[in-house]
Amino acid sequence: MAKAKGVKSVAQNRRARHDYFVEETLEAGIELMGTEVKSMREGKVNLKESYAQVRDGEVFVQSMHISPYEQGGIFNSDPLRPKRLLLHKSEIRKLQEAVQRKGYTLIPLEVYLKDGRIKMELGVCIGKHLHDKRDDLAKKDAQRDMERALRTGTKALQY
């Protein structure tokens, strides 16, 4: 069976971009078991509440839920087990330095299939305050109003 070319999104962590400023992103492979891969290909993965940690020179994703594969039987593993990310040593050192700065954390942003392999987009993030979230919502609303006005051909509302 030929591997599919291109990128296909499996799951996204939409809440992450709402709660955090994403400073930089990094692509990493994930060390998975066979039934986990099959379950992920079906889209049965949840990135909500997940985060990554650097421990002993390795990066692990915590709280990423992969539902058990239905035909897995005894081969299914714990859905919440820590999964190791596959990164180069220099990338791990760079992430460790970033996390040691005050307020920074590693958040999984997206899981996708790239040329038949499961990859994760990992973000180095810093938390947003409430007023930052309000500013983002106001900008989105203003952008939506402008697009709507352009689409309908009417004048924009005067404030």
Image: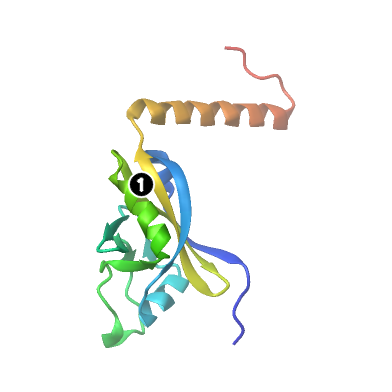
Viewer-proximal residue, 128 or 151? 128
Residue at point 33% right, 30% down?
Answer: 129
Q: Given the current orientation, which residue lies at the most extreme right position? A: 153
Dot 1 falls on a residue whose secondary structure is helix
Q: Residues within 10 Å of mark 1 (few under 14, many from 20)?
A: some
Residue at point 35% right, 51% down?
Answer: 106
Label 1 belongs to which residue?
A: 98
Q: Is residue 102 above or below residue 137?
A: below
Q: Is residue 6 above or below residue 135?
A: below
Q: Is residue 3 left or right of residue 45?
A: right
Q: Quadrant of the N terminus?
A: bottom right
x and y, in percent, of residue 150 in the image: 71, 29
Residue at point 42% right, 58% down?
Answer: 91
Q: Is residue 150 left or right of residue 12?
A: right
Q: Quadrant of the C terminus?
A: top right
- Does residue 148 appear anywhere in the picture? yes
x and y, in percent, of residue 45 in the image: 38, 65
Q: Is residue 15 above or below residue 93?
A: above
- The scheme the figure's colours follow is rainbow
